[in-house]
Amino acid sequence: MIYEVPETVDSAVALLSGATGSARILAGGTDLLVQMKSGVVEPDLVVDIKRIDGMKSIAQEDGGWRIGAAVSGAEMGEHQALCAAWPGVVEAMELIGSTQVQGRATLAGNLCNASPAADSVPAMVAAGAVVRVAGPDGVRDIPVEEIPVKPGKTSLGKGEFVTSVFLPARPVNSGDAYLRFIPRTEMDIAVVGCGVSLTLDEAGTCTAARVGLGAVAATVLVVEDAAAALIGSKADDTALDKMAAAVSAACKPIDDKRGTVAFRTHVAGVLAKRAAKIALARAQG
Amino acid sequence: MPLDDQTPGQKPGEARQFKVVGTRPLRPDGIDKVTGRARFGADMSAPGMLIGRVLRSPHAHARIRSIDASKAEALEGVKAVVTRADFGAGDDDVADILDNCMAGEKALYDGHAVAAVAATSAAIARKALKLIDVDYETLPHVVDVDAAMKPDAPVLHEGLSDETVPDGVSQNVVHRVEFGHGDVEAGFAKADKVLERSFKTAATHQGYIEPHACLATMGTDGIADLWVCTQGHYMVRNTCAAILGIDQGKLRVTASEIGGGFGGKTTVFLEPVALALSRKANRPVKMTMTREEVLRATGPTSSTSIDVKIGMNKDGKITAASADLRYQGGAYQGSPADMGSMTAFAPYDLENVKTVGWDVVTNRPKAAAYRAPGAPMAAFAVESVVDELAKGFGLDPLDVRLKNAAREGTKSSYGPTFPAIGLEATLQAAKDHPHWKAPLGPNQGRGVACGFWFNFGGDTCVSLNITPDGTVTLSEGNPDIGGSRASMSMMAAEELGIPYDQVRTVIADTGALGQNEVTDGSRVTFAVGLATIKAARNAKKVLCERAAMVWGIDPEAVEWADGCARPAGDNAGKFPPMSLKEIAAIASNTGGPVAGHFEVNAEGAGVSFATHMVDTEVDPETGAVKVVRYTVFQDAGKAVHPAYVEGQFQGGAVQGIGWALNEEYIYGEDGRLQNPGFLDYRIPVASDLPMIDTVILEIPNPGHPYGVRGVGETSIVPPLAAIANSVSEAAGVRMTDLPMSPPKVLAAIQNG
């Protein structure tokens, strides 16, 4: 195994493009190192991107926030302006692993591990996050939901890697929230995860909404029917019930050791409603 | 000379006044453990050491047609490969243990060892495993206890059933036991209500943090040494010697610090394999398990299926009780169905009682002991029915238990008549505790349950040596899992009348002491404590003799009090007291070094009872259960180090919470374990738990000089039932299937 620590995006892309065997990106390493230790992956090349300029920064851009690919959950949690703007995304990120893991784990890594149960991804989907990808053909920006294609697999091509995640500018009277269900209180994988982001007008009517759903299908889902149930409503109980029903209807889960189809489908609706109420309260200030 | 069981000045029957026992000194292993200086099983190394790894069956049940290891043996760096062919027939009484350590004709469960390699690095060893070619003929498998009992179930072992097993069940049923007295049918006929319920519990693992690890060296001269993480290195020595066909005296075993055992380290897995590899390679071999190996291939407890029937009158009096308890113990005989059957109704004074237990084999790893083996599941079933009947009559569940409680003179459901016991005291303490009266919030419920454990004694040796400067070293042969070094030092200090910090207790290797039973059965503080006290008394006798020699008086005229030899009375003569340090300083000139030792098969371990009280809150929309408040009431006889006793109470409750709510072995249709890791085998994390409050009761055990009873195991007996009773109340539906994981609780609520 070859370990490389490039200092520019271009040299990282060159290394990845020129790799003859399997290549993996190392940022926080909280997925990669565990997989290597257990023998699940045996990469020929590991490219550590932490020393590349911008990978460790959280920067304001066009009223939104650009989060470098090597920024840890702990750094996000300590960034007051980011927490104020996108509390749902930050709380989703902070649910991952232990305190120790939080010191290393990254938003981009959680996304590129491509687990359908990744906590930060439904929250990023709800937030309308845009991912910047560098590669042999230059840089491109793509919606977050287009990165994972199936469990463990992303849409990134050879030589490509995620350099940052962009959370857009927030309209006034907006709020987001993420909730997950786990059998324990921490150190667990989501059985269901749900992110909700919404915007209200002066009268308290919902003008925009996005709902992201995790662990109930092969990839994180964007539930447009659920968003539609909120838009135009005051997010009252009737609208929330309609949204919960849309969320449950969108679920395509499996029976496995972590939960049953019936359980996941039901709890997805419950969580969506609870998350929407938190997002609503945040939007109302 | 007054060196009997009484303290000088203590009147018979009067409670002894202790100076050291009952205090809370710092634990002697604390600094080592927080600084990383403590040496656990994997911390041992030797020059030229090889790394051993095990190849494990991917099949739940398969005939091993052949094993071709030639490619692995040819790999550079590989120094030895062993399969079952490298072991002799071995003694009959270790045949199952050997077969579990290294499969013979058949692989009997997913994870069963089929070969092992020793190589110069872990990477080479892993690579070598992939080069071993095993030709399997897969066979139908069975992992569920009820399915395994059916006449047409796949059979693991032909002809294993003994004469106790009736016709009409599978040969997987190895043994049937029955306990009880009276006429249960007549008793049921007299009851105002008879309730019959069926229960299921999942297999759970002890969940010790430290995986199994050892370092073995065995030379061509047949002399062997083994360093190992175990609950009993004497057991390891005897078992490995029998498996390898060597004399016990040729194998010296040293126990490392131990990162938890809870019963799971009372047998061997890697140790005979490491010795066999070392013998073949003529090099030291170190082996450590991964967590996946620990879960797939060591010994979880039984999963069970239990039917309980109890008749009760409107006033809460139980008229009759019976239970049918089916325990699968994995691939070999020896599930704790017998102990489950004996403990099921032990808390109650019953006129008519009958329990039947079934020991069943399945394609799972062989069950090992787990903290009060067999008892928690039986208590779960029985205490659930007692609770439902009590609540059905509108009676206070604690009152109902008090009304039927076993007490001194009760003929127990398993035979013996109880001496002084503490069950009523725990129930009364529970009733008087503020927890019992505290208001409950929405979606909350409160449950109580009782539990019983026998406690054991067994073979024990202690050697107490006094150094020339008058400090004391105590050698015992039981790995310290629950604070026994502190307790032994305290009891020795108490007896000798010296400060706690003047005694250092060490765990001696198998060359240093005679046979010692494993650290199990909650026996150590009782049995090793008893031997420690007796060894100290023997040392005091020598100390008094030395003082008598100096004073020129009769040894009978010297007594030991407050750390000094003193003339026993005015007639003995007037001499200033001689301290232990003073006598130690002149030991060489008065006959040689001073020591005391004691060897015993300790009897008189007092039985132990506990009552647990727990509040839970159920989320009616998700089925999630939160433990809100928990209080343990248990009889300790005499708490030598109360902080450790509280720790044992809390630890048992916490393991019980895991067992009740989320822990389970999950098998796929293919018979393979689906959750061999701590991510999906869910033991509780700290944030899942409230503070576990404890109330220590002290009803002295007449079988121990200070009244000590074992406390380690009883604390895991009541929690499954107490939590089930609490959750059932909070959810509004009776829960009879463990674990009460969120999908199950939600389904129960939705189905009413």
Image: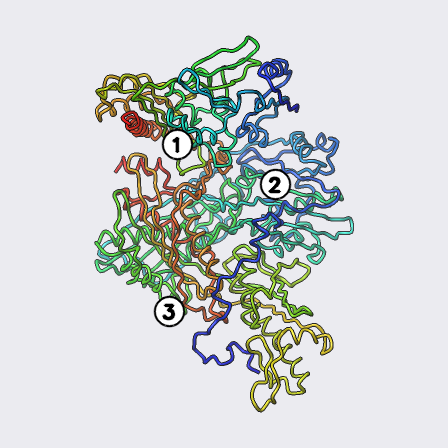
- Disc 2 with disc 1 on a shared chain: no
Residue identified by numbered label 1: A259
Q: Residues within 10 Å of mark 1 (few under 14, many from 20)?
A: many
Q: Label 3's element?
A: loop
Q: Position of residue B466 (x, y in %)?
A: 65, 69
Q: Which mark is residue B408?
A: 3
**Quarter the N terminus of chain B occupies:** bottom right
Residue B141 visible in the displayed image: no
Q: Label 1's element?
A: loop
Which-is-in-front pick, marks 2 and 1? 1
Q: Is residue B326 above or below residue A224?
A: below
Subunit that carries the residue with mark 1: A
In the picture, measured across the screen, residue A29 lies left or right of residue B725, that is right
Q: Amino acid at mark 3?
A: Glu
Q: Which mark is residue B103?
A: 2
At horizontal 51% and vertical 47% (from top left) the residue drawn is B367
